[in-house]
Image (cartoon, grey):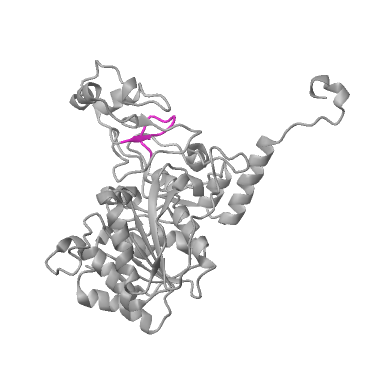
């Protein structure tokens, strides 16, 4: 079988000296002070996150995969036991992109595509939650990036009608992974252009649109400047809003970082809800979701704002994995996510390789498309139940302490 994007970034001579001293679960604190580094001097002096210069642990989820997971000092991006950074494919696995989702463009762009994405399995949970309320399981993806949200909705058999993204490298990946969609409506352009918005809106002339999804920047949102054409802080949100207003999907889903909840003491989220309510949408309380609760082998938090034309209250998707709930499987670990992938040396790997590796976990089977999500979850639950099973001897007299 073919494996794509399994490429490990290189390390400088100084970085190579550092990584020899960092154990699994370790970080900058394990690097000896005699190794010269001005950044480490500053971190030791002022303190720093325990994820800096970190190495992943096999039996825990990864930390958040960022847009620079090729950089040693950025976070915990070292392979648990091999002396190298995680590969592009391993980063994609930890974000829950299946192996047949191929990333294109420069390596720098691929790191950004993966780090900026909504984990597909997190989006899948949202899609499953909304499916029972929809008449049309069709959607348009705005600010689509490399396609994490679309991939997740596709797992629940939603049909992609069109998508828009301004970054060409990101959208090259998107388009090549959605060849079944009408390519005329996969648009690489600027959403602020009227002709671009009108082309996206024209999809609704022939197709019923169930959902519009996307992650417009909202950090600069200002209700006071909402009707002021000279206030550019709202521009990209306005474009998202205008397409929702004119297409009138049954639902819209907006994704954002958790920080949006605290901007101006939560006023931004309230004002966004007011804007959509003015055009007839009921806006739910924002959902704050933890990716590891939904099968993603990574600690990542995201906010989802969901609105509907009907007054439908949407609760958070049912938690499927938990560190604390005994009746649920524990979150997927780094071991379950990447253990079976072929070993690499620092700076090694090519875009496409032939390999005969075999899945070592239910999660790897899911990533290799050997099973679907429901089969995956049944396997994981079964494993969890067998691990938690209490031993009851068939002949208690042989085990008097248990009788």
Q: Residue at x 24, y 19 (%)?
A: 35
Q: Nearer the viewer, residue 348 or 219?
A: 219
Residue 365 as seen in the image, left or right of residue 173:
right
Q: Nearer the viewer, residue 15 or 248?
A: 248
Give the extent of the magenta segment.
Answer: 75-86
Q: Is residue 129 magenta?
A: no
Using the rendered view, name the quadrant where residue 27 is placed: top left
Residue 47 against residue 130 in the figure, above or below: above
Q: Residue 344: where, in percent of width, then height?
A: 41, 37
**Does the rendering let one see residue 317?**
yes
Please tell me whether residue 94 is drawn above or below residue 175 in the rendered image: above
Question: What is the chief secondary structure element of the magenta stretch?
Answer: loop
Quarter that holds the C terminus: top right
Q: Position of residue 144 (x, y in %)?
A: 33, 62
Query: From this viewpoint, which residue is outermost toward the bottom?
Result: 205
Residue sitting at the far left: 230
Note whether residue 98 is visible: no
Where residue 141 sits: x, y (%)?
A: 36, 66
Q: Quadrant of residue 343?
A: top left
Residue 150 coordinates in the image, percent (x, y): 41, 62
Frontmost residue, 237 versus 92:
237
């Amino acid at each position: 079988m073919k494996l794509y994007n399994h490429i490990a970034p290189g390390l400088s001579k100084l970085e190579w000296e550092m990584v020899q001293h960092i154990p699994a679960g370790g970080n900058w604190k394990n690097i000896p002070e005699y190794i010269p580094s001005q950044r480490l001097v500053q971190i030791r002096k002022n303190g720093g996150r325990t994820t800096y210069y970190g190495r992943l642990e096999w039996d825990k989820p990864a930390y958040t995969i960022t847009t620079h997971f090729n950089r040693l000092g950025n976070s915990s991006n070292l392979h648990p036991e091999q002396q190298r950074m995680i590969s592009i494919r391993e980063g994609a696995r930890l974000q829950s992109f299946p192996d047949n989702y191929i990333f294109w463009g420069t390596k720098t762009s691929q790191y950004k595509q993966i780090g900026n994405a909504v984990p597909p399995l997190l989006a899948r949970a949202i899609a499953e939650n909304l499916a029972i309320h929809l008449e049309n399981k069709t959607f348009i993806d705005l600010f689509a990036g490399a396609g994490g949200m679309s991939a997740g909705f596709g797992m629940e058999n939603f049909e992609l009608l069109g998508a828009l993204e301004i970054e060409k490298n990101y959208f090259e990946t998107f388009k090549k992974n959605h060849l079944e969609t009408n390519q005329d409506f996969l648009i690489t352009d600027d959403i602020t252009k009227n002709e671009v918005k009108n082309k996206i809106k024209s999809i609704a002339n022939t197709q019923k649109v169930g959902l519009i999804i996307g992650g417009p920047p909202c950090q600069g949102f200002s209700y006071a400047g909402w009707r002021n054409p000279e206030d550019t802080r709202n521009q990209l949100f306005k474009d998202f809003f205008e397409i929702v207003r004119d297409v009138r999907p049954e639902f819209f889903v907006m994704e954002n970082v958790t920080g949006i909840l605290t901007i101006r003491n939560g006023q931004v989220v309230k004002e966004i809800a007011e804007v959509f309510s003015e055009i007839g949408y009921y806006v739910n309380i924002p959902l704050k979701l933890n990716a590891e609760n939904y099968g993603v082998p990574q600690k990542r938090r995201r906010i989802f704002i969901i609105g509907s034309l009907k007054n439908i209250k949407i609760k958070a998707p049912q938690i499927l994995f938990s560190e604390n709930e005994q009746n649920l499987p524990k979150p997927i670990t780094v071991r379950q996510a990447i253990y079976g992938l072929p070993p690499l040396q620092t700076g090694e790997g090519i875009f496409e390789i032939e390999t005969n590796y075999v899945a070592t976990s239910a999660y790897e089977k899911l990533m290799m498309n050997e099973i679907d999500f429901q089969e995956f979850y049944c396997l994981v639950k079964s494993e969890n139940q067998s691990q938690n099973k209490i031993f009851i001897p068939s002949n208690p007299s042989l085990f008097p302490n248990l009788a």
